[in-house]
Amino acid sequence: MNLVIDIGNTNVKIALFRDKELFLLHTATDVDQTLIQEWILQHNPEAAIISTVRKADRFTWLATGHFPVLHAGINLKLPIKLLYKTPETLGSDRLAAAIAAADMFPGQNSLAITAGSCITTDVVTAENEYIGGTISPGLHMRLRAMNHFTGELPLIKNIKEETPLLGTTTESSMMSGVINGITAEIQGFIAILEKEIGFFNVIFSGGDGKIFAKKLKSRIFAVDNIVLHGLNLMLNHNV
């Protein structure tokens, strides 16, 4: 049993894996130390891995000595080869998504797209090489930016997935600009990338992934919690 903790910009996910199977999942806005300790006592994990995009290191309490606790990143042995020019700046969440994509389609080109606070793309080749990707603002970040940097545009909190191409109100115009704009952005990137590297699989994940996966007219594999799966694979590769 593996304990996997993924601390993102918005949510914290705590998971237990049996081999490659996601067995138990808890999602919150902050680390639930009590829950983690209860899971450790109840399920007796053999190893743990932590991925965080937040600066604070609050996990000394997790180093119980009963099992190894790894921090995800390039400091670990990796099942893929990194060709990224600044690997020390590569987020462990992006790295995990790439590892999961490579495991899903071994010996094939794959593109992992994660739609969360930011929209990230990460490409792994048929030769098992991570060659890079993109980062752009996510759905909610774009909506907040329009509200913050203008005097009149409202802050939209209720997301309507079915958005007309042409908005007939200010709110629907903003939603169209963001959702249809992101969709077109991803479609364009897929088309350009295919000319560069040929055929590749497309895996879509993230909190807002389902909104866009069904809008894209492409070969999309919608996968829940791809970062967690990649972190679990990273842990297995090291212990």
Image (cartoon, rainbow, N blue to C red):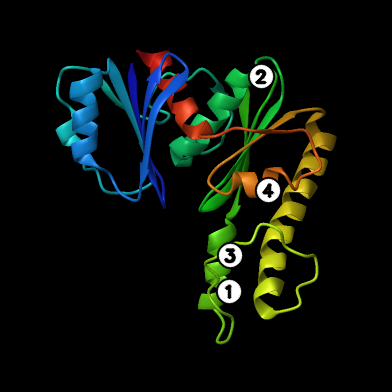
Distance CA(mark 3)–CA(mark 2): 32 Å
- Separation (CA) of disc 4 from disc 2: 21 Å
Numbered mark located on residue 212 in the image? 4
Write down the quadrant of residue 66 in the picture: top left
Position in image of residue 174 (x %, y %): 67, 71
Extreme-bottom residue of the structure: 151
Q: Residues within 10 Å of mark 3 (few under 14, many from 20)?
A: many
Label 4 – label 1 distance at C-alpha: 20 Å
Task: Look at the numbered discs 4 and 3 and tell me whether their residues touch, using CB distance below 8 Å.
Answer: no
Reading the image, the residue beneath label 2 is 105
Q: Mark 1 is on which residue type?
A: Met
Does label 4 or label 1 sit earlier along the sequence? 1
Which residue does the numbered mark 3 point to in the structure image?
A: 142
Specify the amino acid type for callout 2.
Phe
* Position above or below: 138 against 153: above
Label 2: state its secondary structure. loop
Q: Do the residues labelled 4 and 1 touch (CB within 8 Å)?
A: no
Identity of the amino acid at label 4?
Phe
Local SS, label 1:
helix
**Residue at point 85%, 36% (across, down):** 195
Residue 126: x, y in percent? 70, 19
Q: Disc 1 or 2, which lies upstream in sequence?
A: 2
Q: Are marks 3 and 1 in contact (CB under 8 Å)?
A: yes
Identify the image quadrant of the N terminus: top left
Residue labelled with disc 1: 146
The amino acid beneath tag 3 is Arg
**Residue 135 relative to residue 32: left or right:** right
Q: Residue furthest right?
A: 195
Q: Is residue 206 left or right of residue 173?
A: left
